[in-house]
Image: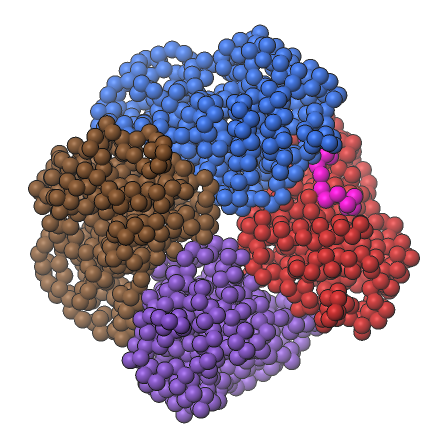
Chain colours: A blue, B red, C brown, D purple
Amino acid sequence: MFRFLPLLSLLAGAHALENGLARTPQMGWNTWNHFGCGISEELILSTARVIVQKGLKDLGYEYVLIDDCWQAPERDPKTKAPVADPKKFPHGIKHVADEIHKMGLKLGIYSDAGSRTCAGFFGSLDYEEIDAKQYAAWKVDYLKYDNCYNEGRSGTPQISQQRYAAMSKALNATGRPILYSMCNWGEDQPWNWANTIANSWRISGDIHDSFKRFDERCPCTQVLDCKFAGYHCAVTRIIDFAAPLGQKGGPGHFNDLDMLEVGNGGMTYDEYVTHFSMWAILKSPLILGNDLTAMSDETFSIITNEAIISVNKDVMGSAANRIWKQEVAGGDLQLWVGWLTNWDTVVALMNTGEETIKTSVAIADVFTDGSDWSRKAAYNLYDLWELEDNDGRRYGKYQGVVRGHIQNVH
Amino acid sequence: MFRFLPLLSLLAGAHALENGLARTPQMGWNTWNHFGCGISEELILSTARVIVQKGLKDLGYEYVLIDDCWQAPERDPKTKAPVADPKKFPHGIKHVADEIHKMGLKLGIYSDAGSRTCAGFFGSLDYEEIDAKQYAAWKVDYLKYDNCYNEGRSGTPQISQQRYAAMSKALNATGRPILYSMCNWGEDQPWNWANTIANSWRISGDIHDSFKRFDERCPCTQVLDCKFAGYHCAVTRIIDFAAPLGQKGGPGHFNDLDMLEVGNGGMTYDEYVTHFSMWAILKSPLILGNDLTAMSDETFSIITNEAIISVNKDVMGSAANRIWKQEVAGGDLQLWVGWLTNWDTVVALMNTGEETIKTSVAIADVFTDGSDWSRKAAYNLYDLWELEDNDGRRYGKYQGVVRGHIQNVH
Amino acid sequence: MFRFLPLLSLLAGAHALENGLARTPQMGWNTWNHFGCGISEELILSTARVIVQKGLKDLGYEYVLIDDCWQAPERDPKTKAPVADPKKFPHGIKHVADEIHKMGLKLGIYSDAGSRTCAGFFGSLDYEEIDAKQYAAWKVDYLKYDNCYNEGRSGTPQISQQRYAAMSKALNATGRPILYSMCNWGEDQPWNWANTIANSWRISGDIHDSFKRFDERCPCTQVLDCKFAGYHCAVTRIIDFAAPLGQKGGPGHFNDLDMLEVGNGGMTYDEYVTHFSMWAILKSPLILGNDLTAMSDETFSIITNEAIISVNKDVMGSAANRIWKQEVAGGDLQLWVGWLTNWDTVVALMNTGEETIKTSVAIADVFTDGSDWSRKAAYNLYDLWELEDNDGRRYGKYQGVVRGHIQNVH
Amino acid sequence: MFRFLPLLSLLAGAHALENGLARTPQMGWNTWNHFGCGISEELILSTARVIVQKGLKDLGYEYVLIDDCWQAPERDPKTKAPVADPKKFPHGIKHVADEIHKMGLKLGIYSDAGSRTCAGFFGSLDYEEIDAKQYAAWKVDYLKYDNCYNEGRSGTPQISQQRYAAMSKALNATGRPILYSMCNWGEDQPWNWANTIANSWRISGDIHDSFKRFDERCPCTQVLDCKFAGYHCAVTRIIDFAAPLGQKGGPGHFNDLDMLEVGNGGMTYDEYVTHFSMWAILKSPLILGNDLTAMSDETFSIITNEAIISVNKDVMGSAANRIWKQEVAGGDLQLWVGWLTNWDTVVALMNTGEETIKTSVAIADVFTDGSDWSRKAAYNLYDLWELEDNDGRRYGKYQGVVRGHIQNVH
């Protein structure tokens, strides 16, 4: 107990990019996962209206994010300032921002720390100041900053840091609070240096709408020195990557497990529940990636689970840690434990195997860092997907059932 | 289906070195694999004549490439310009280029981003501008640029990029379109940074005329952080290396799996068919490496398969991905799938084992990225080596026979 | 025998940071492991008094170390000099140093080679000279220098060395002998370059009060190119890390296995004995981390074992090497051998398994580097935890019993 | 056959440091392995006399090498020039060189690319020009240049190359041909960049007089990205390291497997025969490391095997390659093949296991790179340790017996 306190102090005191944003992981919606380059003012604004109408805004989904392909073919030939595609955005980005702000939401935009964006539009490398000023002039509130065509400026933390710090400095210099979402795919260990320059940083290649299909397009099996981020990364692969990194996040600076795929059709209900729950307890930004204008009730029920969202929004900002991982038929069973404020604890059992498992968890495993007192105390146990106190106080160990491809989050 | 489109956009929009060359992977012939340093004007021109006469030019084999050993012992003592060996090239390189151009072909030359070429002749490191100008003056159309004696200028993407970008800049400055073929053997992950400076980049040490003989002279078993490229790399080893990298190629910028060994005698017919097919669907340059003046009918039949070549020349420039790899007796069975224009798909089953295998492939595996629709549709299936519609529409899965050391490409 | 001598010369002659300190590994007490940020002048001085009163000072525990959280929220706004928290240290650091010196002890302080300390206070990066001068003015005798928020200045030995050498130079420039304890968690192989700039260097992430509980918060399983030090590292993990590194330590420059957890409650008596013994024979600094004002007799008996401490204080400063490691039920059995002065040898058998093992050790394994003579000689064998000559001379092999989670040190 | 020729050209034409030295691997004797710091003028000269008297000079052992510990405690306080220890070398180094030259031998000396030598004497880092001039003034013919205390100037090939190139340039500037023997223990892949600046480069940590005892003091099990060279490396470990590297050596620039241990007592006769043979066919420098003044007949017979030495001195300078490695009881059986001039081939079968093995080798394995012709030809087979034609022409495969811990070299 006693030794637990300093650690809390440590986490609470951690300093991040000093723009005051992302005290808990950012929430919102982004165009890419579902619409890719097929974007427009109409799509952005109609989705924003749904966010308000369906109550998503009230749950915290406040950022409406335009991803790649919003740009005109070239920068302004004289000023070199970025220009939006006049067909997709006939009234310009500022107009979209104004409309978004009227709804009480915030607008995000996308660029790339390279000579080109991933889709081939102009990048911001060596244009950081011009671009940051333009974003601020447009009243943009958020920048996702990608890593394609980086001209080889990588290979050590120092080289990558300098490239991403240039935009951080430029954004701060505008005077407008702009949430800075780094997307360098985990290259050169950003968890070690992005905390003072960004509000969040991606830890992997792009997510794929699959629970556990292995693919060499996302070739690394370990995160710590991955030399090729790739894309097409399954949900369980990204969770494996996140396991050691939780200690590096905190208020104002979070690991980003990539945007959500809930509702895009590649996973089962149980798998989407697991995907959403794990993102939440790992304190990843919760950025929806589906078509909100044509969403099933099932999808809606997942992304609006207030109990899960409240764990993500816990003010400590402390990510759950994986306590153990055991092989089971066709996968593994994992125990995750996270600290919340007021001595609450979130516990997740994740089963990536093919079969339903009946298991129990030692209370000592849940409180590995606590005192004797914590290991012997009694607790109320709530199932965050059942929203009821399933039989209350337990002693010594938890017994329960974990279905295949699902987790129970308590 | 819907989500497939943005990805297509992404690939189509990718930007590369802006010299307009290599919109599909370059095709041609190179002296090294068969003749090494035993080259001459006579060899080059007589081979070029065969390329025209036998119809190889019409199939796309347009580049005639002089590899190492064309140089005089030293540069011009006054101008420091490169000089050709007067015995091997009595009329100089320009004369050869003129003759090649008269035949409607293009000429390539070789140098090295180091103090010496691999064979010990003068290298171009720190002579980039002088050399590029001379190549352009000689009317050269293509440069293969090697990596020997690089004086330790490697170790991070940034260091290697700067060394290779110097020649890219010098070539562009000449005003002559010169295809730039980087050969740094995959050091420092060129797939991440060569796309904006070169038309292709090698991914491994030199190929060896062997299908799967392991050799410590090519010691790495993984490509992502290989610290010693070596040479003597077997075909299946290079294919393993290529597996995650396909996503990095596209029109104007391709992964180079090294020059072909078809016809040089170290593999069986089936193995050469596999070698040629895989190079084609992985969108590698197809650079012949045999003696074209003394070629067997069998060799000719392989390198002139129009169906296979047309896959290589597909305008999307999208390399096939490996979907799965299963152990079989003495090797493995691999499924590769590539996207082509007009929703065509190329499928390859490669068997590196010793025995013929009867197997079936789930259609769902072929269309892992597609919609429900694509997975349920009916398809015409063509065998690109049989050139007939082998029994047409199939549903749900493909059944067939894969002989040892062979692949079926559909 | 003959060949043994040069090696001794080598070790004895090794040069380190030339401040004359740490001729044997430093000993003392540090606030962090038990008190974290909960520190104050009162805590420091009352603990110092206990160190004197209980005889710990006489055993060599001379450094009283204030870890993180001693700082005021900000530096002096004018001079930029570091300022102590006026609530925790109402009379300032110099007063504490004076009181400590009166007791015949020495005072240490903490800072960080980054923009912030791990707990979020001001760091010393780019303030090295100002801070070193202030520490010297305060009469500080020791600096622990951490690695949080290092702004990406890492990734090669050169980059990390420059960051840590800046403080080394600044400390030397003060003219006051200040023991320099580097804490960069083993990043970029400090054992290769810290010897000329520091008196000790950490080799891992922070210790956890556990003997062998694996935790992904300390994710590396090898030390040589660990890309993520983490924290929560169990004792046996740190010992594994230390195995190859002993050759890099010597008088004036030692590997630091992190502060001791003896007495903090997470291990059994046998485990703490092993922890303390291994730290001693591996020539780690012995920095107590428990609450000395409320210590059990058992804890006291461990940390005051003079025989073990004398091995740590042997003037050769030569760490024990692991000769072999064998799997046993639930762990492994390890043989460690260290050279002492006067041809004495320390031998440790460590059993991390669950069961008591009866085993024997070949004398030839103990003297792998010695001559025929050494392998055939007779020896007196002392158990450093029994402090008696347990049956004296032995020939050819040692037979004994090693309980689970314990070691015998001879 | 045809394709074999260009490769020969490649190797023959390779360019190295242009001082004209080490056209074949250097041979000689060095003080370290047997005498360590216990050296003196008397030891050097008396050993040199033995080299002449016993005919070792006539066999090619021409360099007499003083290793570490020849230095005075400090440089000349005014000129900063290096100074020899006046007790060990009362007449100075120049006198020793003169005496050595009178015997028709050459003298080598030692320094370190760091602030200190490994034994703690002054190093040459940032003193390259002063030191090279002094060595030349002393008429020194050879420099071994070590890697201790390198102040973190490592981590990429570029950083290490610059440190070692500084001395190369300084030596060349003296105008005296001084063989430059780099000893950076294989850090940062010197085989890729040392060829143009040095005559040889070490590939591992220091050798230990043991055939195959594993030791964590030499912790790496692979050579390509070893982050900790260590010392105490067994002979078979170093041979494993050398396996992929042979392609990087050639006339004027060789891989150095470290000095020989033959005659120092830690291995059996068969093991020393293997050690000496493998060093020879891998084209390592052959630097004796035993006490030549007290050498057994057995030791003498090994180091004077003219047939083995002649393979090492073959003018092609081409190291043998490992063709295969098969597990056997307690070790492995390895086939090595090397190309010599005049189409001769050296074949070695190395057995690191515990038992004698009766085996056969396919001729096709010996000539994996040759033509059909070479695989079908008849050969004379000589056993280089029996020096007789053991039954002459063989077809198709070789059958023979390989004892444990021994190799047969043909």
- Indicate the position of residue D178 as horizontal and vertical percent values: 51, 77
Q: Reply above or below: A279 against D154.
A: above
Res. D12 image quadrant: bottom right
Magenta run includes residue A111: no
Q: Residue at x 27, y 75 (%)?
A: C2
Comparing A200 with D257, the one in front is A200
Instruction: Identify the residue at image location x=19%, y=56%.
Output: C313
x, y percent for residue A113 = 60, 36
Q: Residue at x 49, y 15 (%)?
A: A60
Q: Nearer the viewer, residue C75 or C410?
A: C75
The quarter holding residue B8 reads top right
Apparent side of residue B165 relative to residue B135 in the rendered image (left or right): left
- Relative to C263, say whether B356 is above or below: below
Seen from this angle, which residue lies furthest top?
Answer: A53
Q: Is residue D179 left or right of residue A149?
A: left
User: Is B7 in the magenta?
Assistant: yes
Which image quadrant: the N terminus of chain C?
Answer: bottom left
Closer to the camera in the image, B83 or A260 = B83
Picture residue at 66% right of the left edge, 68% below the top: B120
Q: Which residues are magenta?
A: B5-22
Residue C29 visible in rendering: no
Q: Position of residue B403 (x, y in %)?
A: 68, 48
| Residue A34 x/y as whole percent | 63, 23
- The residue at the far front in this view is C78
In front: D69, or A345?
D69
